[in-house]
Image (spheres, rainbow, N blue to C red):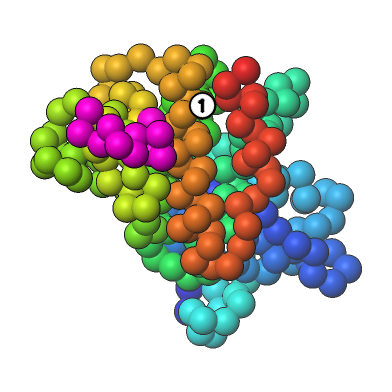
């Protein structure tokens, strides 16, 4: 069997003396792994940094088995562009680590994340707006993997305007004015998450990341019995500082 696809490198591990088992998110096949002969060699390993995009061919006997990747070319080399920008490198590490931990091997649903993720990483040159884009990406990550929040209307009244908070129990939006008795137990809902014209100030970014971080940890990662990767906690101060 054989297929070709575009892919984003999520990571890899050494296999034997110089082989590399490469972990990627593909455009049409979801998250996949494959053996790259000589991929861990000094000559080749630089091109297999997490965050790089490439064209590759997978070949193997069965789809369920570990096959071989033949890398045609690296189309976008991202970490090498940001060696003097630690915040951008931390962002790339966090995005690829979250995907590696949350998306199951062979899960085709992961393909829906390929384009949003590459667009997000390609926007790293626009750092002033990047934190807001990242928060929206985390919201999309939850949705793509079946843990989306319901931010379209108030869970109490059904109204679709004036939404200010989110319930940690249900993941549904509410109007704070209609939940006065327990509003302190709710997460603030930053307007920019539901209104593309709204500005995102530092406090809004902080509220958004607290919201998405809670559901990433309590719903998504708990469902696969893993902790939320520490890389994310290290990135947050760089996004709101």
Q: Position of residue 17 (x, y in %)?
A: 88, 68
Q: Is residue 44 above or below residue 106?
A: above
- Which portion, as a residue range, is magenta? 177-188
Residue 216 visible (yes or no): yes
What residue is rendered at 13% in x and 34% in y? 160
28 left or right, relative to 214 = left
Q: Position of residue 12 (x, y in %)?
A: 70, 58
Query: Does the magenta-highlighted stretch encompass residue 183?
Result: yes
**Quarter-wise, where is residue 80 in the image?**
top right
Judging depth in this view, the residue of 23 and 178 nearest the camera is 178
Judging depth in this view, the residue of 80 and 136 nearest the camera is 136
What residue is rendered at 19% in x and 45% in y? 155
Q: How many marks?
A: 1
Q: Position of residue 16 (x, y in %)?
A: 84, 72
Q: Main SS type for the magenta part? A: helix
**Quarter-wise, where is residue 14 in the image?**
bottom right
What residue is rendered at 35% in x and 59% in y? 146
């Amino acid at each position: 069997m054989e297929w070709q696809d575009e892919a984003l490198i999520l990571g890899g591990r050494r296999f034997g003396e110089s082989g590399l088992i490469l972990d990627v998110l593909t455009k049409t096949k979801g998250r996949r792994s494959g053996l790259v002969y000589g991929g861990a060699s000094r000559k080749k390993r630089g091109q297999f940094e997490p965050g790089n995009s490439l064209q590759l061919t997978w070949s193997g006997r069965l789809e369920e088995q570990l096959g071989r990747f033949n890398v045609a070319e690296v189309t976008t080399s991202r970490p090498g562009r940001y060696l003097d920008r630690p915040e951008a490198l931390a962002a790339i590490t966090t995005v690829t680590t979250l995907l590696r931990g949350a998306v199951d091997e062979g899960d085709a649903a992961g393909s829906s994340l390929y384009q949003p993720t590459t667009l997000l990483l390609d926007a790293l040159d626009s750092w002033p707006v990047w934190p807001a884009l990242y928060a929206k990406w985390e919201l999309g990550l939850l949705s793509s993997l079946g843990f989306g929040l319901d931010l379209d209307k108030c869970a109490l009244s059904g109204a679709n305007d004036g939404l200010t908070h989110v319930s940690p129990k249900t993941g549904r939006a509410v109007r704070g004015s209609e939940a006065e008795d327990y509003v302190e137990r709710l997460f603030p809902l930053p307007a920019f998450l539901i209104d593309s014209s709204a500005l995102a100030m530092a406090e809004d970014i902080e509220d958004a990341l607290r919201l998405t971080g809670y559901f990433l940890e309590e719903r998504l990662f708990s469902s696969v019995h893993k902790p939320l990767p520490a890389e994310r906690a290290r990135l947050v101060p760089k996004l709101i500082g």
